[in-house]
Amino acid sequence: MLLQNPQKEQLEQSPNHSLNQVQVLIAAVHDVRPFATILRGLSFGSNATISIADAGLKVSVEDGKTLTGQAYIPMSMFDEFKYKRHTTDVSQEQDPDQERDQDSDNESDAEATFDIPINTLLECLNIFGTGFSVAVTDNKKRRKWKQGSDESDEETGLGRNKKTVPPKNNATIEQFFFSSGGKKTGMRMSYAGVGHPLVLILAEDASGPTTTCEIQTFDNDSSIELPFDNSQTAVKMILRSSWLRDAISELDPSCDILTFSFMPPSEPPPGSVNGNRKGPVKPTFRLSAEGTFGSTQMDYPNDREVLESFECLTPVKFRYRLSRIAYTLRALQSSTKTSLRIDHEGLISLQFMMATGGPNAFIEFRCQPLQDDL
């Protein structure tokens, strides 16, 4: 692998990585871009909480008391992933039954957790300038649910003043997202436990330069919890991320409030053949924003080209701060599909399936509605 020899030599020479020191975490990857891209989707906060478990990493960021973002990074994303649980020293005089109970508790709560400045981590991952990748683009022809005078998606790209280049020769998303050309940054990451820094050894190609970064970690403070009760789900739908990404990125920055409105799918009129109907298609999902210079409204019909699945039994309408929802844009740009859920109290859950890392790599945002809607 790219970093196998440089990393091994560097670990043996570093005083922080003596052979006698037990590492809680050792993770290595030959191309850091998938890992860095997922973390970049959570860069709206100052500190991130990293939880290490046998299945992989969970990275959590929060903003105020109304927004949380969590990235789930499976161990399969790494070329090497070793996690050794910390065990608490047990007194020799402790009762054996109590010792077994404590071991059982440690097994059920088998996570090592620490806080770290997420922007510092991202800067280290991109120290050679090759740590980030381009955004996902969607070169499929899409039916437009806009006015005829609007410019096409191919002309506008992402947002109003951006232009994207679609993949050539029908390349897959992974091939376009992380092209094989150009230099790559390999990484070996280690963590020795409470009070120790997170150590990154980064190398640009096998014969390129190698650098070591040590980032101070902090004890994890109490984090906010925004639990989502699946039994209280009012709306659940799955759509292509590009539809939601384009809609949010084209909103006027002066808008302050973003309203999500949902209507149950209407039944076909009597006498229709195979559900076909004439006239305009009634929207089941509506995004509307209000600002200083006016308002914007975007409707999404219950069409399989737009919404892969849609479940809603009663009309639902909640309002959110646009500044909070806009934090999801970086994750949207790197994702392929979006799962949107809202419970009866207005808590919204946005899960983004990332373009790399396998089906278990995703980012989830949860946001509380405006207090007036509660």
Image: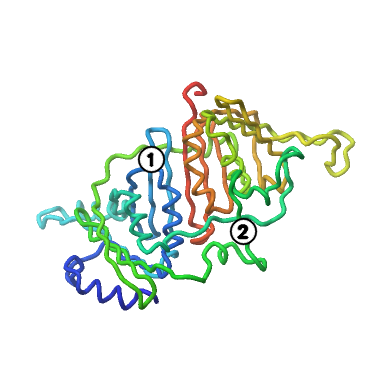
Residue for badge 1: 62
Q: Residue 290: image x %, image y %?
A: 57, 27
Residue 176 in sight: yes
Query: Label 1 crowding class (10 Å Cα cut-off): few <14, some 14-19, many 20+?
Result: many
Q: CA distance from mark 2 to mark 1?
A: 33 Å
Query: Label 2 crowding class (10 Å Cα cut-off): few <14, some 14-19, many 20+?
Result: few
Residue for badge 2: 165
Dot label at residue 96: none
Kindly identify the residue that appears in the image at 36 percent across and 68 percent down.
28
**For marks 2 and 1 on the same chain, the one whose residue lies earlier in the sequence:** 1
Kindly identify the residue that appears in the image at 35 percent across and 61 percent down.
127
Kindly identify the residue that appears in the image at 57 percent across and 47 percent down.
338
Please identify the quarter of the rendering in which residue 213 is found: bottom left
| Circle 1: residue type | Glu
Marks 2, 1: nearer the viewer: 2
In this view of the protein, which residue sits in the foreground, 315 or 333? 333
Q: Which residue is situated farthest in the top direction here?
A: 372
